[in-house]
Amino acid sequence: MCEHHDDKAINRRQALIGGAALATAVASATAAGAQTADDPYADPEKPALPPSNMVLDLARAALVVTDPQVDFLHPEGVTWGVVGASVTRNGTVGNIESLFKAAKQRDMTVAISPHYYYPTDHGWKFEGALEKLMHKIGMFDRKGPLNLDGFESSGADWMPEYKQYIDDGKTIITSPHKMYGNDSNDLTLQLRKNGVDQVILAGMSANLCTESHMRELLENGFEVAVVKDATAAAMLPEGDGYLAALTNFRYMANAVWTTEEAVQYIQDAS
């Protein structure tokens, strides 16, 4: 009995030693990347995580764009003061349009997951910090689920650049998500009904709706590539939302692409 116990103890020590060695290697790689990159968003020079092997198949793929709306992406939108620098730096508006254009040229499935708030949503009895803020500033407000009065050119409307792609009668426009993820709307149903199990994900905002959609899609068995410069996020004293999201994209997504890469993959896919 004692001998068996000692074997277990040895195995634990070996595991701890091995784990410590791996942690040291990862820390060294992270430090090396940080030391050589003046850009905090740059990819590490010596990644510790394995590379992606995702291969795009248009027959079972969709472009999914979260919240391609005025309140997030336009200088007159209610969040521009906190997201504008990130949107501008990434070229987010133009990059999302490039993805729309490429997907439409290849007759690829395209889905939009919008964010709307109706008057009844303002009666919620409890809210998180950002829910409180969004309701306070009237973000994505509409007069009702069956009412489009005042929708045109409002903060809840699509960016003008995207209307030709979204309003073409082919793009899937899901029911609205109410917080961040797509578990509260019909995106997963719509994708499944269209035979989709691969997603190219873009839109706003990186550490909120986009990341939450990524997590929910992954949990539901989709293969997800996030387009890192076709999103952006708020920069607040509480933290840089884009940097937080980028870390999680690298950790969890099946692939993290630039817009240029994603467009090329769409053009080259069979």
Image: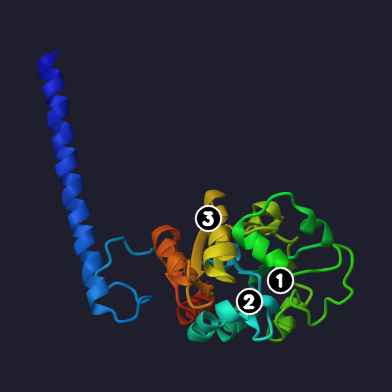
Q: Which residue is mark 3?
A: 215
Q: Specify whether 229 is left or right of 50.
A: right
Q: Is residue 199 visible?
A: no
* Residue 79 numbered tag: 2
Is label 2 in a helix, a strand or a loop? loop
Of the two numbered discs 2 and 1 in the rendering, the one whose residue sits closer to the viewer: 1
Q: Residue 218 placed where, x, y %?
A: 52, 54
At a point 75% along the width and 74% down the height, the residue shown is 156
Q: Amino acid at mark 1?
A: Ile
Please tell me in which quadrant of the rendered image residue 178 appears.
bottom right
Do callouts 2 and 1 mark residues in contact (Cβ within 8 Å)? Answer: yes
Please tell me in which quadrant of the rendered image residue 104 appears.
bottom right
Of the two numbered discs 2 and 3 in the rendering, the one whose residue sits closer to the viewer: 2
Q: Residue 220 placed where, x, y %?
A: 57, 49
The quarter of the rendered structure image containing the N terminus is: top left
Question: Is residue 14 shown above or below 216?
Answer: above
* First along the sequence among labels 2 and 3: 2
Is label 3 in a helix, a strand or a loop? helix
At a point 67% along the width and 61% down the height, the residue shown is 132
* First along the sequence among labels 2 and 1: 2
Q: Residue 11 placed where, x, y %?
A: 16, 32
Q: Residue 139 placed where, x, y %?
A: 71, 70
* First along the sequence among labels 3 and 1: 1
- Residue lying furthest top: 1
Q: Which residue is mark 1?
A: 137
Q: Callout 2: 10 Å neighbours few (<14), some, many (20+)?
A: many
